[in-house]
Amino acid sequence: MAAVTVLQPPGRYGDGPVHIRVDTARAGLWRPPYDYEVELNDWRCKWDPIFDYVEIENTHSAFIYLGQMITRGVPPAALAVVRLAATQSGS
């Protein structure tokens, strides 16, 4: 499971990337925001058996997309905006 810091709204530009973390057991049927996909290239996200992660440019956008996902029926308890812990190389 990826080490994360859960972020709170309202968010701002220029502070990303961040991720929308989706608890797949709680979320039911869900889909990423338009033009985004579940992160499969980052090993911190790829091997997490509980959560899916969708990378977003900044927290301002992430909280907007999170609200849209809730409007489409994803339970709020299944969603969080998070910042992944840095890798050993600092990236």
Image (cartoon, rainbow, N blue to C red):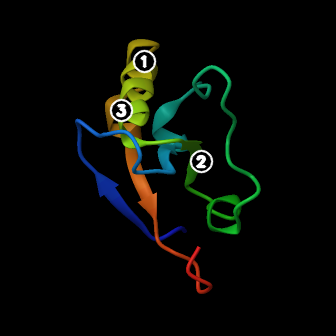
- The earlier-in-sequence mark between 1 and 3 is 3
Q: What residue type is labelled 1?
A: Gln
Q: Which of marks 1 and 3 is in front?
A: 3
Task: Kindly identify the residue that appears in the image at 40 percent across and 39 percent down.
Answer: 79
User: Which secondary structure, mark 1?
Assistant: helix
Q: Badge 2, how many Cα within 10 Å: few under 14, some, many 20+? A: many
Q: Nearer the viewer, mark 2 or mark 1?
A: 1
The residues tagged by marks 2 and 1 sit, at their Cα atoms, a distance apart of 17 Å
In the rendered image, residue 21, in percent from the top left (x then y), is placed at 48, 47
Q: How many labels does the image show?
A: 3
Task: Kindly identify the residue that appears in the image at 37 percent across and 44 percent down.
Answer: 80
Q: Badge 1, how many Cα within 10 Å: few under 14, some, many 20+? A: few
In the rendered image, residue 86, in percent from the top left (x then y), is placed at 51, 75
- Tag 3 residue: 63
In the rendered image, residue 84, in percent from the top left (x then y), is placed at 48, 64
Identify the image quadrant of the C terminus: bottom right
Is 39 or 23 nearer to us in this picture? Answer: 39
- Tag 1 residue: 68
Residue at the far top: name it: 72
- Tag 2 residue: 52
On the picture, is 2 further left or further right than 4?
Answer: right
On the picture, is 60 further left or further right than 2?
Answer: left
Whether residue 36 is situated above or below residue 42 in the rendered picture: above
